[in-house]
Image (cartoon, helix red, strand yellow):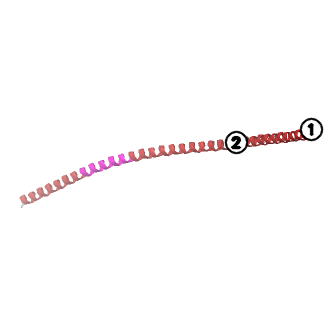
Amino acid sequence: LEVTGKDSAKAQVRECYLEIKHRDEENAALKDGSLRLHKELDLLRAQMIENDRQHEEEVVRLRTELRMARRHEEFLSKELEAQRSTSGRRLNELQSQSHSEMQALRSEVQSLTLRCEELSTGQRIMAM
């Protein structure tokens, strides 16, 4: 009876040992999986950080381009306004000059018309 008790105890010890060994193997596999997942997570975090950095750089670049485009637009707007003003003044000058030239030509035409009339009248008087 003692032998069977010993054998039974040995069998139980062997079963416990096998179960502990099996659990140790499972724990080792879980630790390996956990380490692998942590490494993947670290890689994903690094990728996210890099993506965020690149995104931020792109945002800064686009904001800078937008700021430059707005400044250029303001410059062009001011330049256009200055050109409009200059064109307006030049148009007024040309209109004034044209008006003066027209007045001078009208005066000259009137003067020539009077002279022609005088000459025509003079010729009539001489013809009589």
Image quadrant occupied by the C terminus:
top right
Q: Amino acid at mark 2?
A: Ser
Residue 13 is situated, as x and y percent measured from the top left of the image, at 14, 55
Quadrant of res 122: top right
Q: Which residue is mark 2?
A: 87
**Which residue is pictured at 78% across the width and 42% down the height?**
96
Tell me where residue 51 appears, x and y as whole percent.
Answer: 42, 46
- With 120 as the anchor, is 91 left or right in this view? left
Residue hosting label 1: 126
**Where does residue 23 sit, x and y in percent of width and height?**
21, 54
Q: Is residue 57 magenta?
A: no
Q: Are marks 1 and 2 in contact (CB under 8 Å)?
A: no
Q: Using the image as rendered, state which of residue 63 and residue 37 is in the foreground.
A: 63
Of residue 95 and residue 45, the one placed in the foreground of this image is: 95
Tell me the distance, in whole angstroms, between the alpha carbons under discs 1 and 2: 57 Å
Mark 2: few/some/many CA within 10 Å (<14, 14-19, 20+): few
Residues packed near mark 1 inside 10 Å, few (<14), some (14 to 19) or many (20 plus): few
Q: Helix, strand, or loop for circle 2?
A: helix
Q: Amino acid at mark 1?
A: Met
- Please give the count of numbered marks on the rendered protein: 2
Residue at (89% x, 39% y) in the render: 123
The stretch of residues the image draws in magenta is 28-45
Q: Position of residue 3 (x, y in %)?
A: 6, 58
The tag earlier along the polypeptide, 1 or 2, is 2
